[in-house]
Image (tube, helix red, strand yellow):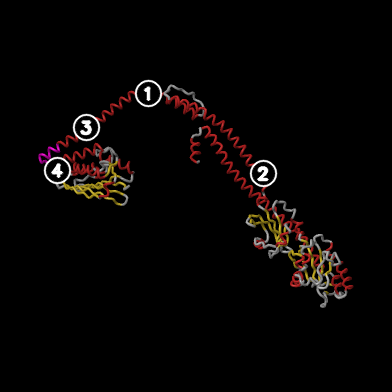
């Protein structure tokens, strides 16, 4: 599949490629911009909406706190009301008539503080023998002040009130039938199924202008119960967060569910481990996993009850509609820009490709042998230059065709000359071999050896045309040269070799040692009275190859020594070797010459190992 796509791309016309290129060049930045814009928009909008939802949660919590704080103030006022203490001063628990009269008095006091509140579901003043209510004097099974006779003292409400001994305490939402153990009401549809309450043991006192008065020791201290329906929180939160899929809940400091948008959750009372961290933090916004899904959670703690109000929002619903609009805008914009790019690319490519098509047709005709074509120059400056060069090319090709026959004849002549040159060395080799055979037949071994050395030198000189040869090849040539020279001056010279075998496989410039050896025989040992010594040493040290030619001849004067490596001197061979080494290996390598007059000369050639 990939190969087919690559094949199609390779075979697209220039015009199509240009159009595709324009579209790609516009699309890629647009996609990058769109993704970046979408991401930034998503984050910004999400932050704004989260802050707004968080502010709503805080505002709702403040409204709830205001209402509950007012109730708290009324409870405080009720607990120090003079009429309440006066009524209980005359109570007779075993006298029903007395209780009835006392109930009316207590109800009037309670109505003064609680009857006007629309948020309070009911208010009760409970004892072991009777329950006084703020709105209903009769404790019937259908009244909202109903508490089963003798059932109050065994409840958790009573236990909490007594433990706090006069301090107001908020009791989380409970099932009425479970709290008061009235099982027959579990399946009855009652208005006060789920309640949360504020309870306080009346253990205070009032000031009559002279002294503080309290209940007599023999009077049972009543417990005030102010009840709220669970929908108290529903009214505050239900319509304030208009985000699809969101819901609210209220939990106590212990993590117990107090209110939930879905009332069935109150009966379930499943543990909510994810709220523990929120309770610790108290207020803010978090992104957490609930049932394996990411959810944005805005939360705030009530200053009155200490309970945590929480709003849970699906991230996709938070900014879904806005992001859908943003996506649509980006897609429409991209589509418009792509259309514009297509029209622009069509216009530009037409301007580019029309002259090219003319040139291509001209090339086709030229390929068929028509070199008299002339194309009118048009298009961009580059295209006009191309057409101009094409016209010039055709003219030159025509000239070359005319000259082709003459060039072909010259090539044939050069080929014949080359063949003749190959015949000359071949004749020389045959002649030397003939002389060698005659020398051997006449027992002239020395002459035979010199002819063999000369033949080796000749073959090396003629056949090897490469710039670099193996050291073994060049050294064999050098040995042949030295052999002939020592035979010429037999007995006057001593030759010593100290060659590292590893060097023979390395490449070296052709004839790189021969000029220095030749100088030893021609100059150093010229008119030399003593026995001459020529020492050739070659070795590897680190990454450098060293080739050293030493003699004990006449030496070189210092002023002459300084001029040896310059091209204007007679030592052309030495300069040639030095220059070739610099060109091949670089300026870090070359020749060093040391000489002391009447003591000898030392030439060191340095080449890299690699």
Q: CA distance from mark 1 to mark 3?
A: 36 Å
Range covered by the magenta-colored residues: 435-444
Left or right of residue 425, residue 53 in this image: right
Check the image and report above or below for 16 versus 222: above
Q: Nearer the viewer, residue 155 or 294?
A: 155
**How many residues crowd around disc 2 within 10 Å: few (fewer than 14), some, or many (20 or more)?**
few
For the question of whether residue 392 can be seen, the reply is: no
**How many residues crowd around disc 4 within 10 Å: few (fewer than 14), some, or many (20 or more)?**
few
Q: Which residue is mark 2?
A: 325
Q: Quadrant of residue 476?
A: top left
Q: Is residue 442 magenta?
A: yes
For the question of whether residue 71 can be seen, the reply is: yes
Q: Position of residue 244 (x, y in %)?
A: 70, 51
Residue 489's disc number: 4
Q: Earlier in the sequence, mark 1 or mark 2?
A: 2
Q: Quadrant of residue 448?
A: top left
Q: Position of residue 256 (x, y in %)?
A: 70, 64
**How many residues crowd around disc 3 within 10 Å: few (fewer than 14), some, or many (20 or more)?**
few
Q: Which residue is mark 1?
A: 401
């Amino acid at each position: 599949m990939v190969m087919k796509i690559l094949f199609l791309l390779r075979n697209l016309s220039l015009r199509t490629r240009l159009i595709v290129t324009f579209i790609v060049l516009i699309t890629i930045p647009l996609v990058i911009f769109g993704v970046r814009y979408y991401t930034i928009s998503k984050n910004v909008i999400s932050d704004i909406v989260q802050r707004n939802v968080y502010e709503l949660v805080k505002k709702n919590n403040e409204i709830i706190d205001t209402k509950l704080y007012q109730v708290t103030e009324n409870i405080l006022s009720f607990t120090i009301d003079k009429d309440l203490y006066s009524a209980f001063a005359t109570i007779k628990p075993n006298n029903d008539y007395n209780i009835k009269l006392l109930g009316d008095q207590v109800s009037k006091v309670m109505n003064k503080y609680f009857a006007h509140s629309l948020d309070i579901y009911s208010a009760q003043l409970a004892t072991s023998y009777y329950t006084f209510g703020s709105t209903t004097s009769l404790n019937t099974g259908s009244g909202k002040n109903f508490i089963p006779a003798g059932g109050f003292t065994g409840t958790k409400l009573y236990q909490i009130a007594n433990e706090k001994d006069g301090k107001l305490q908020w009791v989380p939402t409970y099932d009425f039938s479970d709290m008061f153990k009235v099982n027959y009401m579990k399946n009855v549809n009652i208005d006060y199924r789920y309640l949360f309450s504020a309870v306080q043991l009346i253990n205070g006192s009032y000031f009559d202008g002279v002294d503080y008065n309290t209940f007599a020791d023999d009077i049972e201290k009543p417990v005030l119960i102010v009840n709220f329906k669970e929908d108290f929180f529903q009214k505050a939160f239900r319509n304030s967060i208009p985000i699809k899929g969101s819901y609210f809940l209220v939990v106590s400091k212990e993590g117990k569910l107090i209110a939930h948008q879905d009332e069935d959750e109150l009966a379930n009372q499943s543990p909510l481990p994810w709220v523990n961290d929120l309770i610790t933090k108290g207020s803010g916004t978090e992104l957490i996993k609930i049932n394996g899904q990411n959810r944005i959670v805005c939360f705030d703690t009530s200053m009155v009850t200490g309970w945590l109000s929480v709003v849970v929002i699906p991230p996709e619903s938070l900014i879904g509609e806005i992001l859908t609009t943003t996506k649509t805008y980006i897609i429409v914009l991209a589509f418009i820009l792509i259309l514009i790019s297509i029209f622009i690319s069509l216009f530009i490519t037409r301007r580019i490709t029309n002259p090219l098509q003319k040139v291509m047709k001209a090339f086709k005709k030229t390929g068929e042998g028509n070199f008299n074509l002339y194309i009118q120059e048009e298009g961009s400056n580059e295209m006009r230059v191309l057409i101009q060069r094409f016209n010039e090319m055709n003219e030159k090709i025509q000239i070359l065709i005319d000259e082709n026959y003459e060039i072909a004849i010259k090539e044939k002549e050069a080929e014949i000359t080359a063949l003749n040159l190959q015949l000359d060395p071949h004749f020389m080799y045959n002649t030397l071999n003939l002389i060698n055979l005659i020398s051997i037949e006449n027992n002239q071994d020395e002459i035979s050896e010199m002819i063999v050395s000369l033949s080796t030198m000749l073959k090396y000189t003629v056949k090897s045309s490469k710039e670099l040869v193996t050291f073994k090849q060049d050294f064999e040539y050098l040995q042949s040269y030295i052999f002939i020279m020592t035979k010429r001056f037999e007995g006057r010279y001593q030759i010593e070799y100290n060659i590292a075998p590893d060097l023979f496989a390395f490449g070296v410039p052709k004839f790189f040692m021969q000029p220095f050896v030749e100088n030893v025989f021609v100059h150093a040992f010229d008119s030399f009275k003593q026995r001459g010594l020529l020492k050739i040493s070659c070795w590897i040290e680190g990454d450098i190859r060293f080739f050293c030619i030493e003699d004990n001849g006449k030496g070189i004067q210092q002023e002459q020594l300084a001029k040896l490596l310059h091209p204007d001197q007679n030592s052309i061979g030495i300069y040639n070797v030095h220059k070739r080494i610099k060109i091949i290996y670089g300026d870090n390598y070359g020749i060093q010459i040391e000489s002391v007059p009447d003591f000898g000369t030392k030439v060191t050639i340095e080449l890299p190992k690699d």
